Image: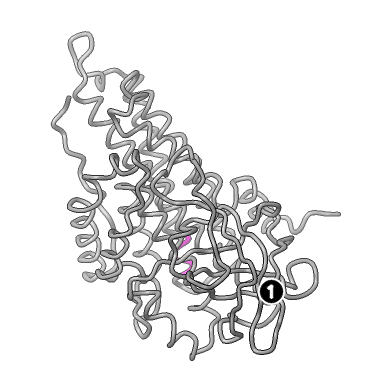
Amino acid sequence: MSDRVPQPVERQLPTEESRDLIALVRDIVQREIAPRAAEEEDAGRFPREIFSLLSESGLLGLPYDSEYGGGDQPYEVYLQVLEELAAARLTVGLGVSVHSLSCHALAGYGAKEQQSEHLPAMLGGGLLGAYCLSEPASGSDAASLRTKAVRDGDDWVVNGTKAWITHGGVADFYTVMARTGQEGARGITAFLVPGDAPGLSAGAPEKKMGMKGSPTAVVNFDGVRIPDTRRIGEEGQGFSIALSALDSGRLGIAACAVGVAQAALDEAVSYATGRQQFGRPIADFQGLRFMLADMATRIEAGRALYLAAARRRDAGLPFSQQAAMAKLFCTDAAMSVTTDAVQVLGGYGYTQDFPVERLMREAKVLQIVEGTNQIQRMVIARHLAGPESR
């Protein structure tokens, strides 16, 4: 095999602080995450201690206000941190993205008193979050959710089931969308639910194709009583809050996808430059060289697309369409690149002795989470041509 060590991605970062931040992330990756990633994924072990370390290092609240323990970092920087983490282990990169998603409602729509009370622990106090929108019968059609919250004095009583919840059963808090009024999008309200609330329970983690170290579970709400002080935003505002969070979350998924693809390309290049056939490295053969070139081009295009969308967000410009485009393109690119990486390694690529088979399995889920890629196409088309005729 080749002794070639993949070179870190050369990043264009806006400040010296952001360059130091990426250096910190790379140090944590090399010392704490990458050496155990394959073993722990194979064992299905959730690395809670890594998330505690990231919180202590100020990496779980990067895009949020420092007044409440965040990092004051633009999305342009935050997403590149996610890419670095996901390249080492998707369970960690996507976990940070989901945690940021679960903080979005309170940070963007909560009252000052709520933010002061809860955000410091959420952003830098070691807590880990989960985001509860999908249900067993409402995935892509999220506005038809059935989990109900009924007013009882100064409290709300929540009953229902959420499905496909990342960090389900291990999260310290859940941002929950529940129906408080009429059918459809206008009857949904957002709540911040503590993970130890009486009546809240999680099912056994799903047995997944990839990301085995990241627990994905059904979360049940059986008479969970939540004070009105934990309602986020106005009654009936929950669905618009959810969509706002997903716009940002889709950029996180795009960055994670580029990280997975970059890791696969690095493995493919390392193997191709070291593997000898017919008396020379297989990287000398044009067919394989062209494959590597196409893989690298998809990655660079995806990175440019998610960064362009992030810069729109940072500038206060509309970015929903661009977020959908980035999620669509980057996750499709990750699936293509990881599949090609397996092909470059041939039979070895199909074994667990090399990480590319794991990366290919992990890439698949990125085409599904936070809106399938078919939904992304619908979002993009709606921006271009307006809502569909009925």
Please identify the quadrant where the N terminus is shown.
Answer: top left
* Residue 98 position (above or below residue 275): below
Q: How many marks?
A: 1
108 vs 43, left or right, is right
Q: Count residues near mark 1 (Cα–Cα under 10 Å), then give few for <14, some for 14-19, many for 20+.
A: many
381 vs 351, left or right, is right
| Quarter where residue 68 is shown | bottom left
* Residue 321 position (above or below residue 186): above
Q: Where is residue 140? Give x, y as percent.
A: 67, 52
Q: Where is residue 205? Give x, y as percent.
A: 49, 49
- Which residues, given as a range, are shown in magenta? 309-313
| Quarter where residue 230 is shown | bottom right
Residue visible at 42% across and 35% down? 360
Which residue appears farthest toward the front when viewing the image? 198
Residue visible at 42% across and 44% down? 211
* Residue 54 position (above or below residue 347): below
**Which amino acid, mark 1?**
Ala
Tell me the residue that label 1 is attached to. Answer: 149
